Amino acid sequence: MTGSKLRAKDFETDQDVRWCPGCGDYAILKQVQTAFAELGMEKENTVFISGIGCSSRFPYYMDTYGMHSIHGRAAAIASGLKAVRKDLNVWIVTGDGDSLSIGGNHLIHLLRRNFDVNVLLFNNEIYGLTKGQYSPTTPEGTVTKSSPYGVLDHPFNPLALALGAEATFVARALDRDPRHLKDLIIRANEHKGTSLLEIYQNCPVFNDGAFTVLTDKDSKQDSTLWLKNGEPLVFGENNTKGILLDGFKPKIVSLEDGYSMDDLWVHDESDPLKAHMLTRFFGDPSLEGNLPRPFGLFYVNERESYETAMDNQVQEAYNQRGEGDLDALIQGKSTWEIN
Amino acid sequence: MTGSKLRAKDFETDQDVRWCPGCGDYAILKQVQTAFAELGMEKENTVFISGIGCSSRFPYYMDTYGMHSIHGRAAAIASGLKAVRKDLNVWIVTGDGDSLSIGGNHLIHLLRRNFDVNVLLFNNEIYGLTKGQYSPTTPEGTVTKSSPYGVLDHPFNPLALALGAEATFVARALDRDPRHLKDLIIRANEHKGTSLLEIYQNCPVFNDGAFTVLTDKDSKQDSTLWLKNGEPLVFGENNTKGILLDGFKPKIVSLEDGYSMDDLWVHDESDPLKAHMLTRFFGDPSLEGNLPRPFGLFYVNERESYETAMDNQVQEAYNQRGEGDLDALIQGKSTWEIN
Amino acid sequence: MEKEILEKKDVTILFAGDSGDGMQLTGNQFTFTSALFGNDVSTFPNFPAEIRAPQGTVAGVSGFQLRFGSVEVFTPGDDSDVLVVMNAAALKANISKLKRGGVVIANTSGFDNKNLKLSHYEVNPLEDGSLDDYELHEVDITSLTREALVDSGLARKDVDRSKNMFVLGFLYWMYSRDLASTIQFIEEKFAKKPELIESNLKVLKTGYHYGDTSETFGTRYQVKKAKLPKGKYRSIMGNQAAAYGIIAAAKQAGLKTFYGSYPITPASDILHELSKHKNFGVKTYQAEDEIAAICAAIGASFGGALGVTASSGPGIALKGEALGLAVMLELPLLVINVQRGGPSTGLPTKTEQSDLMQALYGRNGEAPIPVIAARTPSDCFSSIMEAIRISVEHMTPVMFLSDGYLANGAEPWAYPEAKDLPKITVPKVTQKPAEGEAYLPYLRDEKLVREWAIPGMEGLMHRLGGLEKEDRTGNISYDPENHEKMVRLRAEKVERIADFIPDLKIEQGPEKGKVLVLGWGSTYGSIRMAVDQCIKEGLEVSQAHFRYLNPFPKNTAEIMASFDHVIIPEINDKQLVHVIRSKFLMDAIPFSKIQGLPFTSSELVAKIKEIYA
Amino acid sequence: MEKEILEKKDVTILFAGDSGDGMQLTGNQFTFTSALFGNDVSTFPNFPAEIRAPQGTVAGVSGFQLRFGSVEVFTPGDDSDVLVVMNAAALKANISKLKRGGVVIANTSGFDNKNLKLSHYEVNPLEDGSLDDYELHEVDITSLTREALVDSGLARKDVDRSKNMFVLGFLYWMYSRDLASTIQFIEEKFAKKPELIESNLKVLKTGYHYGDTSETFGTRYQVKKAKLPKGKYRSIMGNQAAAYGIIAAAKQAGLKTFYGSYPITPASDILHELSKHKNFGVKTYQAEDEIAAICAAIGASFGGALGVTASSGPGIALKGEALGLAVMLELPLLVINVQRGGPSTGLPTKTEQSDLMQALYGRNGEAPIPVIAARTPSDCFSSIMEAIRISVEHMTPVMFLSDGYLANGAEPWAYPEAKDLPKITVPKVTQKPAEGEAYLPYLRDEKLVREWAIPGMEGLMHRLGGLEKEDRTGNISYDPENHEKMVRLRAEKVERIADFIPDLKIEQGPEKGKVLVLGWGSTYGSIRMAVDQCIKEGLEVSQAHFRYLNPFPKNTAEIMASFDHVIIPEINDKQLVHVIRSKFLMDAIPFSKIQGLPFTSSELVAKIKEIYA
Ligand SMILES: Cc1ncc(C[n+]2csc(CCOP(=O)(O)OP(=O)(O)O)c2C)c(N)n1
Ligand SMILES: Cc1ncc(C[n+]2csc(CCOP(=O)(O)OP(=O)(O)O)c2C)c(N)n1
Ligand code: SF4
Ligand code: SF4
Ligand SMILES: [Mg+2]
Ligand SMILES: [Mg+2]
């Protein structure tokens, strides 16, 4: 297959796609396929590992190798795979429940170990497959099947959690902005380490409109912030608003009103502290005066990937001691003979 | 028992304490007992829940209610207990393996939920009970039983992880500084929410000296920083060094050399961003020019505790609908009769 | 035009349509009306495996099977007498479940080209003769509904949504049913939208009248009242009954309930139900995973509440380690397994009984626990109360087994009054040890049960844990003989529960004889129907059914020995047979079905006759 | 002075002292010297449950039991003939394990007031007559050692640390042993510290000469060479053998090994051992927990490596769900359970066989897997190779059972040469499907085994998962009949492995007769000794021993039927008996011991005689 470049369609399988009509998952699938075509990815060297959830059906729709595993464990399975197969391109597809509730531990350990795999975290702030219970990202107070009087749990901020867990690539995209999503898929693929890409995904059946304010024509300009490396933080209609740092406090200013581009906070993908601050831009963006929700690559940092370190250690052992001699091993140091 | 104030000794049990001679756990046990006496704690209303590990033996030595549960699950068990028994004073004792490896998920979920319990995390950077394998806090490269060629895993920074997981009380102490440890135990007890107190604890048998640079007479002055709310960050012999913020970068300056107290960063327990920066003071302090390791209360923030919210929701249900009527429930809305 | 009215003993109807066609509501309304009338009823919904598969596809078909009779009916029926299909996909998915010669009522608008394509029909099955063996009635339900509402001013979408009322009305006519209760239902449901009351009623009546006036339908049927035990009835589903049972048992024990759970099909509905009833002192807690859920429940039990946790197979597998801890702690704990098709993720929306071995043995070490299984949806109520009684009175974790079939199935329930429910005695410590004497948390009574000392109680401070404990004191002990003693004590404690449970009884048929059909769990209804039929045909066949799977009732071996042949039907690969052989060294004839589906009576009857012969 | 030399057939010595006294080293040296001489040997160390309990306390005692003989010895002995105690606590902890009339060699310095107090002796047991039934030799080992090294210039601590060499030297004298191999050992061990070579050798010889010159010791013993199979031998412990077996099997299969594990006693040593051998293509991975460990191993197997995971009971409980996934995936996977005392945390440092049921049934749904158990420390090597052979050749997860007794026990091993090891054939896909034809990942061969298609292989892309899969294609299928078919195929695949394993064989005794002692796992040695003794006493007793617990060898029922009585001794509560009864409907006489300890031969002999009578 190598050599002849594949089209997006070539990554489709013969299985019927079984998400609900209007589900944000479709758009994400499409962008992955499109990005893969652009990247010239090889089917046979690509593997998708997922857990359980609506989103975790993903591997069935990608004509690559794949595994639809068990709930929450995709990160653990992918770690073992990548540990023995540095040559493969490994993708994890997971939901907010799959990766942050039951699979939370595997996710944070994956991030600190930094296997070179890509995590697509479909965050719809709900459990889709089990029909509408709250997830660790559902906002407090939300009424769901399992919280008829409102959620009591303070939600996780997935990107803040990831940074706390030593992540080396942290980004956010939106099902409704396919171009941007595709670009981040490509960036994630480039990164040599664990890439965490959180994708806001609308679940029209159980949590419709969770991200409407971020996608609706009327509100999105003021409620979203599109990060570009080396560029100032601007947003709003015609990019007339900007964000600057007032001491350590981010402040919204108007560019039509005394402030210029030069005053603004310039995005730096390599700055962990600023990335941390950006993950905390999390007020309800529908309320006036609140910070817009950032999208894009918050933070990236190259650190040796786990499988590289592992392979190096193995190689080192070979270099120092040569290919293991089974007879010598079995025999050990102290033997005797009976005649 | 209520009323008659107990002494530290009164919290001892009749069981032989079975840690290795010289283990840091002894000092911590002593300080807990001392703090409890000072706090006038009631035995029967106090519960210690632990997982498995050397440290997790702790409950056997406290004459309160207790449970030495299973590996990694203390946080989950304590959550259930606290959910039904807001009145009890609940303490979790756990090791770095117990809480950050197998129990990592329960810990981060405990923190975001913010049950009013206190976590004493004995961090000896090793698995003690199972005789010396590396833990998620063991520095890279360390040779242990399970890493004869050196640890490959990038370690967790427990306090950074906790902040990323929405913790409301984050502090660090040291087995070798009993007074300070005791004060933090008392602060943890005061906090109405999950208090995470990381305690550096020396394991003389499997990881001796992990914290020597922080405790040795010669090095500790330059390698430790004792946080006090509202006070500038000073350290070194006679507190002649200070830390200030050069933009967003912490910088060590000499107070004998042009800088004054007024230039320095003043510790503010309620500032999450600065707390975040403090958790990243993590260079190897034995190397010149590196930042000292902070001890004390990094961050505290009052947010409604989970059990309070839960009780309120239950109370609300009672208020609105009165004590449940079993007959009405069983009968439901649509019935018919057969005669 | 007067139509002839035939009398029938029992009828099975299967409503099938797209997920959005409202078949569940239609089925439920028909059920309720029939029950109200005095029929015995039994129902089973069949949801698509996908949340919302594309409209018009086979994957998106939702079905509701319902059986009602003038005799007792214990299952929703094997094959149906009537199949209502709203579109081609519904026909495709369900035609195999219709009796030869049965009635098909097909909504012709659902068989247009688009629908045929989506359901992968090459030719229209209404036209190609493939339904020749059935009595096919084509009705353009969609158009008739639209016509009825042509002046309503409602949007097309709302109009189309009421076409299930047409179906309902029509079937009411066909089975000579009263519209009253559905009219009331519609009025209540749409109280805030009067325009919808009007439109729905109109369509309902249109459907009814269509039967009267249309030429095609020659026959109406009548199913007389059944002779049912007197009493007040309601309809109940298994998961709902389980939820109520937990609330009732906690009340009877004077305990608060803590329900720690992680969502999983088909157990989640218990969580949903319980979370509505906080004013019964119920706290529900959606944990981060199944391990946290059981651990939280253990913590709650330690704190003096009734700790309950539930899941389905894969989640129960995760709870094994913590369940072992609960065995050591000897605290009350209820673990509910609403079984589904396995292994692994298996068939999440289908039923199976394949977690019996896991319930008995899915833990490290010697860790016996009582296991109790419910037999019908309403039996979930009393069985779970019994499970809780045993858990609390015997201070032990208990596994309660239900399954997808019980969980979602519904049946009429002659519900009890609260005052008549069994009491549960809580073995809480009542006395502190005398001054100077140590408290002994593992002292046992004659049932070998230890007392429950709860944090907050003065003078009873103690430490529990998963390491082996010394007899009486509960201190850690590495003593070899103590370990053997404790292993045996824990086992014997569970064994002795046999002294506190009823004997196995013969449900129907002679006390001894040729064939005993011995079941457990949700196969009850199918076995009941099948044995009943065999008896009526003059065969010497009896039925017995386990509620207690560990320990078994004391007379089990005796009952088995009273029959020439014992057949054990199971929705798994002979799991109970294995256990019976091992416990009693007695053989039984296994009859397995592993298709994610309950037994049909006819399958069972055939098997019984084969053995009988 | 010439001392008399008595000949003995076999001798059991128990060395006991504080954790810091070097008893493990002493025992190992004595063992190696005896093996080198030509005795058969068997050993078992007994570590304290605490890491390092306070010096001088009973909790801190470390022991090493060793048996050597001129006949074959299969266990480290029941009671010991000689007990060496370095302090009072060691005596207290171990006196019950000494034969009546046995020899106690006590280090008198270890019985000072401090030691007596720490070990809770009120009076000195060396003086109060409580040892009158034994042959007590008091030696002030500490002082004699210090005297020997008075001019060494070594620190007191280093001097005292070499007192175990005195013990060793003295016992070498007592049993007429050669010092050569220990001298060599010391020279190698302290190659970088010549002063320690000198001091240790000096103390060793002092001990030896002490025997010669001291008046108190009248008797020396001699244990002649055993008649052992010819060959090259080494000493090996169970966990070590398991680690080597994994490396060897992977090599024979041409696979890389991925070992995903989370530390737990007594399994961790396999991880430690394997992590040293990266130059065999072994990758070890310490996962965050047991679930991650098995999942990573599954991922590695998916990637074409040999995925292995290991734990002990509680950790295996956690792996149940993922193991079910592996059953569905039909990939090779080895799961090792080094069993320990349960339930729950139980007795972590003690041995038990109580996870058999968990191995067979500890998963949701119908999820059968092969189960294989090792019988002796060295047998871990070939048994684990066999487990891997089955896993790879039959594309199935396999459970390998060892236990604490095997894991830490050691025995001489006539180790094989690499070239003689069995080959393992890997069913990797060799051909892509023809152009235009779809790849069928669940196509099976006559063994019902599917082929292994590995990422990177062109044209074989496929998706695996835990939902039920369609026969042949592996696509998700909710079809009822397909489900039953697949459940039965998976079960039958495992059953058919019986065609590829050897018959159960009679290890000793007649092929048919009165009593068969039928065991599994680590009870092998004890049973061997006991049956041997019974046969020598003229009883008609035979031994057979399972390596394969699922599926059982095909001739199992036949063998059982050839004996009047079958006794099944187990370190659990009759688990194998349950399985045998259920599988074969044949009874067996259970003989249980649940004390965290292996059977003694005498216990078994007594039981055999009781049944025989
Ligand atoms: C061990 C286990 N527990 C629970 C489940 C049930 N379950 C399946 S998916 C899911 C959550 C799905 O939510 P999410 O991960 O957010 O994915 P989404 O469906 O929203 O895409 C749950 C609870 C399961 N399959 N296995
Ligand atoms: C399920 C399970 N897995 C593994 C173990 C073995 N185990 C016991 S304690 C422990 C780690 C101890 O390390 P830590 O938590 O750091 O505590 P420490 O002993 O250092 O105080 C492990 C792996 C266990 N008891 N249960
Ligand atoms: S339930 Fe929600 S997330 Fe799942 S497929 Fe449907 S729309 Fe998508
Ligand atoms: S092993 Fe280490 S941590 Fe454990 S008791 Fe001993 S010194 Fe303490
Ligand atoms: Mg989701
Ligand atoms: Mg530790």
Image: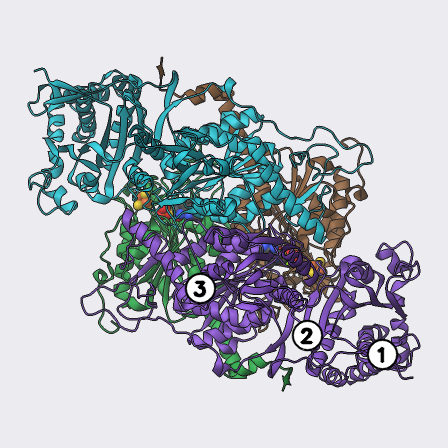
Chain colours: A brown, B green, C purple, D cyan
Instruction: State which tag comes first along the sequence, 1 or 3.
Output: 1
Tell me the residue that label 2 is attached to.
C41
In which chain is the residue bearing label 3? C
Q: Which amino acid does label 2 sit on?
A: Val
The image quarter in which residue D187 lies: top left
Quarter of the image with the C terminus of chain D is top left
Front residue of D602 and A226 = D602
Residue B280 seen by the camera: no
Q: Which residue is drawn at 65% across and 82% down?
A: B334
Question: Where is residue D592 shown, x and y percent of the image?
Answer: 35, 45
In which chain is the residue bearing label 2? C
Of tags 1 and 3, the one toward the viewer is 1
Query: Is residue C586 depicted above or below D44 in this figure?
Result: below
Q: Residue C207 carries which label?
A: 1
Q: What residue type is labelled 1?
A: Gly
Q: Element type at marker 3?
A: strand
Q: Which residue is drawn at 53% across and 32% down?
A: D388
Of tags 3 and 2, the one toward the viewer is 2
Q: Element type at marker 2?
A: strand
Q: What residue type is labelled 3?
A: Leu
Front residue of D10 and D160 = D10
Q: Do labels 1 and 3 share a chain?
A: yes
Question: Where is residue C555 shown, x and y percent of the image?
Answer: 45, 63
Per the model, the C-alpha gap separating discs 1 and 2 is: 23 Å
Tell me the residue that label 3 is attached to.
C333
Q: Could you tell me if the residues under marks 1 and 3 are in contact, i.e. CB atoms within 8 Å? A: no
Q: Do labels 1 and 2 share a chain?
A: yes
Front residue of C410 and B287 = C410
Per the model, the C-alpha gap separating discs 3 and 2 is: 34 Å
Question: Where is residue C298 shown, x and y percent of the image?
Answer: 43, 62
